[in-house]
Image (cartoon, rainbow, N blue to C red):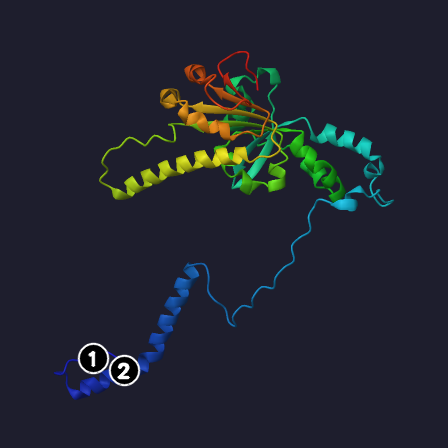
Amino acid sequence: MLQLNEDVPLWQKALFHAGYIALWPLIQFVKRSHTKRNLRRGGYIRTRPKPHFLKPRGRGRSLTLTGSSGNKAPTVQAGLLLQLPRELRDIIWREVVAGKVVHWIVVDRKLVGFPCRANDPASLAGSGHLKCWSRVEVENEEIPRIGVLGLVSSCRQIYTETIDLLYTENTFDVLDNDAMLFLPRLLLPQRVNTITSLRFSWRLRSPPSTLPPSHWMQDQRKAAKRNKKSNDYREAWFTTWNNLSRMEGLRKLTLELNILFSRAAEWTVEELDIVKSVTVPGTLNLVLKGGMAQRMIGNVGASNCCVVDGDSVAYTW
């Protein structure tokens, strides 16, 4: 209730209080309307009665058949394709699913794969493996599809027989830093561990151990944003190497470090000592450019690592 000045006559006080009481329902209505409007702007308004708790939902079954289920003979109701002997089906699956180069990028937080469409695989030297991707970027072509997922996901039996081939018999070419950084979140662990051949073109700038040029910034928010960006760069560097070292099925890894020419001299042998952490693949080709490659040959990596000059004509992916 509002307080009135003591000098106000009694009849005016009585009139004010009577008016306030008469208008009280309208005041409350306006307050409730204002509250509801704010809730709607926030995207949610509780209904009446209160919503019930959601009942727990059972976990969906695995697509892959396990145990004896995967080895059962096809029934009469199965398609003609599944009635063929398993040996013949495996030949068909390999022809359709295997032997491809699949580019990986991240689109809308999802891993998207499309087949390499370079006309001549022998011409894929150095950064030449980006030719077919540049067609999509420059000519605004629609991202082509691999064309095998329809077959793989057509039924549980075919999925069980083909899903391993999809990851073990193809080469995956990662064109996006984020795809390698978040690969454990984008794929199931068992799929990551069945990848046998991987190529990764890694765009880098300064060495992670070096700090950004120090200069005074009056705006503290900009300074904090700059420091966070540097810390994120270092964290992404170590996380990506950790992801590569934990791929249990990897047999061949080709890693190209695309470093700005103006920053190449800043990279030392000590910066690339982390390459030794990737010990699983039998073959690790570390592709560097120009003078940096010459400085690192014989000084970087474990016994499975071979430093390759990316500017060399003899080098092919």
Q: Nearer the viewer, residue 291 or 283?
A: 283
Secondary element at tag 2:
helix
For label 1, the SS is loop
- Along the line of sight, the residue nearer the viewer: 81 or 237: 237
Tell me: residue 101, above or below residue 220: above
Q: CA distance from mark 2 to mark 1?
A: 14 Å
Residue 148 in picture, x, y percent from top left: 68, 34
Which residue is depicted at the point 53% across and 28% down?
200
Tell me if residue 239 comes above or below residue 42 in the rendering.
above
Label 2 sits on residue: 19
Q: Is residue 181 left or right of residue 196?
A: left
Give whichever of discs 2 and 1 has the lower sequence position: 1
Tell me the quadrant of the picture where the N terminus can be found: bottom left
Residue 117 disc label: none
Q: Residue at x 51, y 17 (%)?
A: 308
The percent coordinates of residue 27 (x first, y second) are 33, 75
Question: Which residue position is annotated with label 1?
Answer: 3
The amino acid marked with disc number 1 is Gln
Return the residue nearer the eye: 123 or 87: 87
- Residue at 54%, 42% in the rendered image: 185
In the rendered view of the protein, which quadrant contains the C terminus?
top right
- Residue flagged by tag 2: what amino acid is it? Gly
